[in-house]
Image (spheres, rainbow, N blue to C red):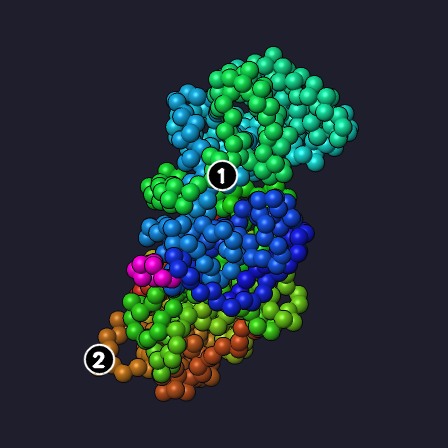
Amino acid sequence: MKIVEVTKFGGPEVLVAGQAPDPVAGPGQVVIGVSVVDVLSVEAQLRTGWGRDWFPAEPPFVPGTGVAGRVLSVGDGVDAGWVGRRVAAKLSIGAYAEQAVADAETVVAVPDELPLWRAAALLQVGPAALSLVTAAELRPGARVLVTGAGGALGLVLVQLASAAGARVTAAAHGPAKRRAALEAGAAEIIDYPEPEKAEAAETAGTTGPAEPVGTAGTAGTGASEKAGAAEAAVSGKAGAAKAVGPGKAEAAAAAEADSYEKAEEAGVGEFDVVFDGVGGDVGAAVFGLVGRGGRFFAYGVPSGAPASIDPALAERREVRVIGMEQVMFAPDEFSRLAEQAFKEAVAGRLTTAVGLVLPLERASEAHAALEARELVGKALLLATAQAVRYDRCGGPEVLELMEIPLPEPGPGQVRVAVRAAGVNPIDWKMREGFRGAPPDASQGTGMELAGMVDALGPGVTGLRLGDPVYGQVAPGAVATHAIAEADALAPKPDGLTYEQAAALPVAVETARRALRDLALKEGETLLIHGVAGGVGLAAAQLALARGASVIGTASERHHDFLRDLGVHPVTYGEGLEGRLPGPASDESGGRGEGKGRGRGAGEGGRDGKQVPGASGGGESPRSVDRVLDASGQGESPRSIDRVLDASGRGELELSVKLTGDPNRVITIADRIGAERLGVRFSTGDGAAAAAQALRESQHVRLPIAEVFPLEHTADAHRRSQHGHFLGKLIINPETSLPH
């Protein structure tokens, strides 16, 4: 199995991916096939060698304490009914792996309604937040301060305290974290400098707040003033405390007392409860803001240690100080709180933001992000992917959403974190078995995608992790992660959303190939059967850009859109030949002279004439020079008893008649009809050609008819088979990904 281990104490780079034997469950244990790993900021600290007095592990070791996945096996004394169940578990160590061993007493079932990634995100912060808020005994109207409010636990505390009726002031560094705290329910936000910035500010002689104060709702002037005073007190105290060096204990004590006195004089020492998730100097500073008789929870260690509070001072101020013990649980208590957190999440009352999601092998990047202290919410590592697959041919019902190992790119390949995938007729034709033999193994679906480069295979150049790309792939694009040949991908233009980009690869490559094989020239007239589909619309735009005129068959409800595009629309069906526009009167009598270059409603051609049909009038095409059949309504080569041809088109036979030459006709869908009539049937040039087509055709845009979540891919196939929509159908897997 794949693991990530700390090879020595040091920076994020000491986290290295490797292989290890699959674990075996001992008595009272289970082995979990890990889907998602919860990453904690304290794990980044432990990686450096911090905390060795209570964390005695020596490198090499596999870090991490929280996972979600499925139980693979159980040891002696454990109910075999756990096998196969969706679970989350708290470990002592060893979470950064594809499989992990957990004591059965810390394993918690994950409700079917809760995605595993959300269970992982809440597994450790959920119980901690519930324990803290319960111990705080919050009353409606209580004033609460949360430091580290933009982190995973801080955001949950803001949410729960606000739901309890408290007025929450959130202390968070940076605009993104403060915005998240407001969205979680904070009434006021304050900023404070990071310790390094506080030290620099003190050196420069300034200790003021780093960012302006914000409030939510219609807070009164007094509340805003108190928030501002609190911010100033926190910023000043943090800077002053950092500036105190070793051997200056008396000066530090004086500065601390002076800070508390100033906070009280400013009238801000009125918080009933402070949840300190930062610790260190910031925690010591905010202690002075607790009102007499209040509660101070000192559990945060991102600064290196919990806030150090003088017990005598706390006693004088009648402030109850609660430490790390409030977030440390016996196994039965942890399980109870985790179950409660999951139930609250299913009910929609508990959540936390996920700010970073990376594959397991990139754990070092997650640690680096945590150390930079810019991350909003949780960091998660993925060990598996979600993919729609089928293991037998048949109708849409054979499609199944499966959990699979994260695919590994080979030489010249990359892994793409898919943000959108296109649906094409070839997808459901392959699913139905038009290629003959059924799949001999589980088969993916979908051949075009857009997303971000997630992993690089050996020998890949020109692409970097995180690059936004789009292109064609082997069947398997309908997934959260897919493998692509590096040369099959093109950079995604900034002006395209991922859904818009995913609509293009197959359509653009097919359209360019068809027009190339037809040798379409400027001034000629092209008839496209099924022009409202993806290939038809792409071909129309490419042909118009070449200076050709385009006639297209489509349902009447799409005609206005097509006219705006510059296409002369014609309703398909019986009598099509009689509805096609005849030759325009032209003294030259020649073919293709004076044709417009249609690009949109009312746009003139190269010779200043109106594009045919661009505004409902204008010049009609003189005749049909080339015919492209993109409707895909030909029969699939499969054993059937009867066929009901609901289209009534007879496109190929009529097309040959119209052009007088089968070499002037091409089809991308009706192989049988093509063979019968001597018409060319066009097949793909390959994914690399598609990437080149995308680079050279960036003006093409396709409308999105409908977007489906990953779990509704079968519905997308049904919709594709039914037809009669404008543009493309898209699968969006983001609901299956942490967000």
User: Which one is nearer the viewer's eye here, 465 or 57?
Assistant: 57
Q: Which residue is mark 1?
A: 153
Task: Indicate the quadrant where residue 579 lies.
Answer: bottom left
Q: Is residue 82 magenta?
A: yes
Question: Please, what is the three-letter code of the amino acid marked with disc 1?
Answer: Leu
Q: How many marks?
A: 2
At 48% from the left edge and 17% from the top edge, which residue is drawn? 293
Residue position for label 2: 642
Compared to residue 149, the image places residue 399 above or below, namely: below
Point out the frontmost of discs 1 and 2: 1
Q: Residue 723 placed where, x, y %?
A: 33, 65
Q: Which mark is residue 485?
A: none
The answer to whether any part of residue 411 appears in the image is yes
Residue 665 on the magenta segment: no
Secondary structure predominantly adopted by residues drawn in magenta: loop
Q: Residue furthest left?
A: 641
Q: Which residues fall within the magenta stretch?
A: 75-83
Residue most extreme to the top: 265
**Nearest to N terminus: mark 1 or mark 2:** 1
Q: Is residue 412 left or right of residue 351?
A: right
